[in-house]
Image (cartoon, rainbow, N blue to C red):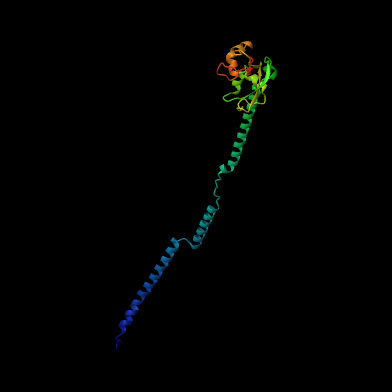
C-alpha cells in the first residue's frame, strides 16, 4: 500500500537543492559585498597613517614662528627727547655766545671814546621819562662816551630816582644878579635850549642862588 505522505517527502527532497542553491547564492553575494566594500574603502592602516600625517602637518603649522612686530618708536622716544634737549641746549649756548660777541662789539675803548671829552665829572640821577641815550644827548655826549663813563650800567636797565650816571659837564654855575638863562648861556658858549634841557626848565626863569648845570655844548 502506498504511503499517503510520500508526496511531502518527495516535495522536501525536490526543494532541498533549491534551498541550498539560495544559501550558496546569498553567501556568495555577501562575500562579494564584503570584498567590494573592502576594495573601495581605505585600509585601516592607511587611515591611521593619514591621520598621523595630518596631525604632524597641523603641529608643523603651529610650530612655525609667528613674526612679532615691535614698535621701535617707543624705544626711540627717550633718545629723540634727549636729542631734542641737547639741540636746545646747544642753540641756547650759541645764542648766548652771539650776545656776548655783540656786547663786546658795542664796547668802545675808554681812551678813544673819552679822548675828546673834557670838563668835570658830575653824578646825575635819572628822572622820570628819561632814557640812557636821551641823557647822553642832553649833556652833549655821544652814547658811546656815556657808556664808557658808566661801564657797569645797563643802558636798558636804568631806574628813575635810583640810577646815578656819571656825566661830563663844563661846570656848575650859581645864579647871581642879572643871570637870566640867555646871559648864562652866552657866557659859557652854549645854547639856551641845551641849558634849559639839562636843567629841566620849560620857562626862561632863574632864581638867585640857583645852581645851573652847564653842559659841554
Residue under the point 38% across and 73% down? 23
Q: Is residue 41 above or below residue 194?
A: below
What is the x, y in percent for residue 107? 66, 22
Quarter of the rendering occupied by the C terminus:
top right
Q: Quadrant of residue 74?
A: top right
Q: Residue at x 41, y 68 (%)?
A: 30
Q: Image quarter for residue 87? A: top right
- Residue 141 visible to an observer of this rendering: no
Q: Is residue 169 above or below residue 59?
A: above
- Please say whether residue 132 is visible from this viewpoint: yes
| Residue 207 picture location, percent across and down | 60, 18
Q: Nearer the viewer, residue 105 or 7?
A: 105
Tell me where residue 122 appears, x and y as whole percent.
67, 21
* Residue at the (31%, 84%) spot, across then down: 6
Q: Observer-nearest residue: 39 or 52?
A: 52
Residue that lies at the very extreme toward the bottom in this rendered image: 1
Viewer-side residue, 45 vs 99:
99
Which image quarter holds the N terminus?
Answer: bottom left
Residue 3 appears left or right of 210 = left
- In the image, residue 141 sits, relative to residue 43, either above or below, namely above
* Residue for point 60% across, 41% down: 78
What is the x, y in percent for residue 146? 64, 20
Amino acid at each position: 500500500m502506498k504511503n499517503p505522505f510520500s508526496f511531502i517527502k518527495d516535495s522536501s527532497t525536490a526543494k532541498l537543492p533549491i534551498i541550498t542553491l539560495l544559501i550558496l547564492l546569498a553567501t556568495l553575494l555577501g562575500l562579494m559585498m564584503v570584498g567590494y566594500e573592502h576594495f573601495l574603502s581605505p585600509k585601516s592602516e592607511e587611515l591611521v597613517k593619514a591621520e598621523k600625517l595630518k596631525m604632524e602637518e597641523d603641529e608643523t603649522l603651529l610650530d612655525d614662528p609667528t613674526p612679532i612686530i615691535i614698535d621701535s618708536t617707543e624705544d626711540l622716544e627717550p633718545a629723540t627727547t634727549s636729542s631734542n634737549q641737547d639741540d636746545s641746549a646747544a642753540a641756547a649756548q650759541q645764542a648766548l655766545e652771539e650776545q656776548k660777541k655783540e656786547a663786546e662789539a658795542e664796547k668802545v675803548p675808554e681812551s678813544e671814546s673819552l679822548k675828546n671829552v673834557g670838563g668835570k665829572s658830575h653824578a646825575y640821577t635819572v628822572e622820570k621819562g628819561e632814557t640812557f641815550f636821551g641823557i647822553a644827548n642832553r649833556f652833549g655826549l655821544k652814547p658811546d662816551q656815556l657808556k664808557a663813563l658808566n661801564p657797569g650800567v645797563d643802558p636798558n636797565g636804568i631806574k628813575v630816582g635810583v640810577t646815578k650816571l656819571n656825566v661830563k659837564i663844563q661846570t656848575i654855575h650859581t645864579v647871581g644878579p642879572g643871570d637870566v638863562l640867555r646871559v648864562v648861556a652866552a657866557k659859557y658858549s652854549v645854547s639856551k635850549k641845551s641849558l634849559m634841557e639839562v636843567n629841566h626848565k620849560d620857562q626862561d626863569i632863574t632864581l638867585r642862588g640857583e645852581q645851573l648845570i652847564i653842559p659841554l655844548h
